[in-house]
């Protein structure tokens, strides 16, 4: 699962660059832990240790910040919860972040990832679709929506989304692996003018 942390300063990201904005949880877990700083904002935004991040974000949340700062702190705390495999708490924080700031697409994207991890592909698809509608060049949203469609059992739509992700970012190894897995499950079916799939030839 990929997550998209955002600084709890209220600033929006400059661009939708997947490489600069995303943190892979597995990578974060493998990094050396950073000791807690005296600044909860730094801990909430930058700590690689999930417990330190969670504590920093909780301190910001308790300080009754502006709605955009609250939303970002809730999202970053959700990332910490997800890193600690507490997905229900992560989901609750992401719901609260979106209640505070509906425009926070990073929270919607991360909530989609949590839904996939919880085995709930339909709300995940809804969240990824909202992100794609707002940022159609964001390859990881296409990738993760494809994974949600795969989880739902809609392999044709999953394949289409994964191909779109690879078209946007040909280096996405996880999209290549997922597409290969789907192709093993169901080879490409052709669709005639009637719109009904034709079973693959053997």
Image: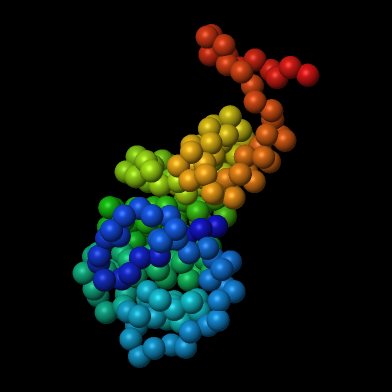
Q: Position of residue 124 (x, y in %)?
A: 48, 46
Instruction: Decide which of 194, 24 is in the foreground and name it.
Output: 24
Q: Position of residue 2 (x, y in %)?
A: 51, 58
Q: How many numbered discs, if any?
A: 0
Is residue 23 visible in the rendered image? The answer is yes
Residue drawn 55% across the image and 81% down it: 32
Instruction: Farthest residue to the right: give it.
Output: 202
Quarter of the rendering containing residue 111: bottom left
Q: Is residue 71 above or below residue 38?
A: above
Instruction: Farthest residue to the left: give it.
Output: 66
Chosen colour scheme: rainbow
Quadrant location, the C terminus:
top right
Instruction: Decide which of 89, 169 is in the foreground and name it.
Output: 169
Is residue 125 visible in the rendered image? The answer is no
Residue drawn 40% across the image and 68% down it: 76
Instruction: Farthest residue to the bottom: give it.
Output: 38
Instruction: Decide which of 151, 195 is in the foreground and name it.
Output: 195
Q: Please state if 138 lies on the left or on the right of 156 as rendered.
A: left
Residue drawn 34% across the image and 61% down it: 97
Residue drawn 44% across the image and 66% down it: 78
Quadrant location, the N terminus:
bottom right
Q: Please state if 105 lies on the left or on the right of 117 as rendered.
A: left
Q: Position of residue 40 (x, y in %)?
A: 34, 83
Q: Position of residue 5 (x, y in %)?
A: 40, 65
Instruction: Farthest residue to the front: give it.
Output: 170
């Amino acid at each position: 699962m990929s997550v998209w942390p955002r600084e709890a300063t209220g600033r929006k990201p400059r661009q939708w660059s997947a490489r600069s904005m995303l943190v892979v949880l597995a990578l974060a877990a493998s990094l050396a832990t950073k000791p807690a700083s005296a600044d909860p904002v730094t801990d909430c935004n930058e700590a690689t240790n999930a417990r330190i991040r969670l504590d920093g974000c909780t301190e910001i949340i308790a300080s009754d910040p502006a709605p955009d700062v609250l939303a970002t702190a809730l999202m970053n705390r959700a990332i910490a919860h997800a890193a600690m495999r507490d997905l229900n708490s992560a989901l609750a924080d992401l719901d609260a972040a979106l209640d505070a700031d509906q425009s926070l697409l990073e929270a919607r994207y991360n909530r989609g990832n949590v839904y996939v991890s919880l085995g709930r592909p339909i709300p995940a698809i809804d969240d990824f679709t909202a992100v794609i509608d707002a940022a159609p060049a964001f390859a990881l949203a296409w990738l993760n929506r494809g994974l949600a469609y795969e989880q739902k059992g809609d392999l044709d739509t999953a394949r289409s989304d994964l191909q779109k992700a690879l078209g946007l970012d040909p280096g996405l190894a996880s999209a290549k692996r997922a597409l290969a897995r789907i192709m093993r499950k169901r080879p490409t079916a052709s669709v005639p003018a009637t719109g009904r799939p034709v079973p693959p030839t053997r």
